[in-house]
Image: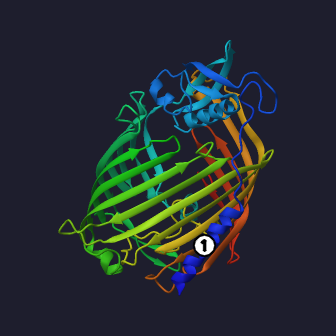
Amino acid sequence: MRLNYFLFLVFVFSFYISVFSFGNPVNSKLFPQDTSNTKSSIDFFVIQQIQLIGNKTTKPQIIYRELLFKENDTIAIIDIKNRIEQSRKNILNTSLFNFVTIDTIIQPENRLCIHINLTERWYIWPSLYLKINERNFNTWWETKDLSKLDYGIYFSWENFRGRKESLMFMFKKGYDELYGISYKIPYINKRKTIGLGISGGFSGNHEVPYYTEENHQLFYKDKEQYLVKNIFSTFHIVYRKRIFSTHTIHVSYNDYLFSDTLNVLNPDFTFSNHLQYFTFFYLFKSDHRDIKAYPLNGNYLDVEVVKHGFNLLKREKINMAFIHASYRKYREISKRWYYAGGVNTKISTSAFQPYFLGQGLGYGNDYVRSYEYYVIDGQNFIVGKSNLKFAIIPTKVKKIPFIPFRKFSLLHYSLYTNLLVDVGYAYDRQGSINNKLSNTFLFGTGIGLDFVTYYDKVFRFEYSINKLGENGFFVHFVAPI
């Protein structure tokens, strides 16, 4: 009965997001003249030249991959403006550049020269690593427990060799420990449609959440020894034939060792103190957002299929799978007014899920705003989010005169206020009866203030209230939807 109710809610929330969806806007300010509604003897342009300016590190082929045109293309004049603007957004969404502008110069005989001006980011970040290890900032702020601080050395080299490759080393200690390496190659073939990546390492935990009681996690800590140890490795392949769609396949191996205490505290924590298993992960993305870090126009869809365990190893006792999907829509309603709506859902097989692998609502972007302090366990869930926002300060660009490096001296920023409404439901068939927020309708609403600046930094400040009558002030560091 509850499962049927859950599936009904999936349908309702799908309708919920479709009602508030709008068509895609077109930026009409880029091209030097708008001829779509005027008579002209020019019906098309021939791209005579594409000139890149400012890409001191990035190889030209990485930029050309994002363009919706190439030299010697013949393009209808009514289409060229939109292609150029979308290409500019595509280049920005590589996260390789802080600023991208495209200038057009009309030449005789319907020929067009295109100049792409680029301000590259700083790509090498050898730095100290400091991070509070919590589900979100607000849960940590309740206790302000500095023992949950992770620290270490983090070395990241983005755009390695100018080919959008990334190389990362991690040496992390503190609350959680991690030692690892990863390397990603975006393209390995001439058509630039296939990429590869590998990673591996060791992680260890001295404190672990072992049970959920009254929708709060209970933790056990052992300063002397690891409660959970994991040796892991991952290989992935990415296929990106088209600009906006990406297919990714991960195959990973995990070798877990668990403390006996965890299964004493919670017999459902894991199947065995020693687990070895393979995981298959498939992800499809269709991304038509204008700016990934803080979208205002466009839409986004992703679908994940995850399978843990294939009965290939002696200690591979896990056999579970789930599908996770997310759809988001962004629309400029009128000047400085914007709407965003989204639906996240997860549907699992009926197989038993051990506690250490189960994640319902309260993790990542899967939560109902105003319930940040809670964990809401469930093998199946759905969340609907909506925002109506107003640009108090539309995007501004300022030059900081005392900083000599262009990668840092140009600063862009914007400020938005918004009204938020979220709904959700988590269906839990194996949890504690004391977790009252599972298997019940969730609702939250409030107001917020979002500050957006360069290097994809977002600072969100929200005041919200839930159906329990609880209210609070919450801080986040990613876009709301």
Residue 271 as seen in the image, left or right of residue 133: left
Q: Residue at x 72, y 37 (%)?
A: 27
Nearest the camera: 73 or 365?
73
Q: Quadrant of residue 170?
A: top left
Q: Quadrant of residue 452?
A: top right
Q: Quadrant of residue 188?
A: top left
Image height of 276 relative to 32, above or below: below
Residue beneath disc 1: 11
Label 1 neighbour load within 10 Å: few <14, some 14-19, many 20+:
few
Is there any visible trace of residue 140 in the rendered image?
A: yes
Mark 1: secondary structure: helix
Image height of 390 relative to 434, above or below: above
Residue 412 x %, y %: 67, 34
Residue 289 as seen in the image, left or right of residue 151: right
Residue 181 as seen in the image, left or right of residue 343: left
Is there any visible trace of residue 422 in the rendered image?
A: no
Q: Residue at x 58, y 32 (%)?
A: 98
Image height of 114 relative to 437, above or below: above
Residue sticking out furthest to the left? 314
Residue 70 x %, y %: 54, 26
**Considering the image in quadrants, where does the C terminus appear?**
bottom right
Image height of 268 relative to 473, above or below: below
Q: How many marks?
A: 1
Residue 423 x %, y %: 65, 70
Nearest the camera: 31 or 373?
31
Q: Amino acid at mark 1?
A: Phe
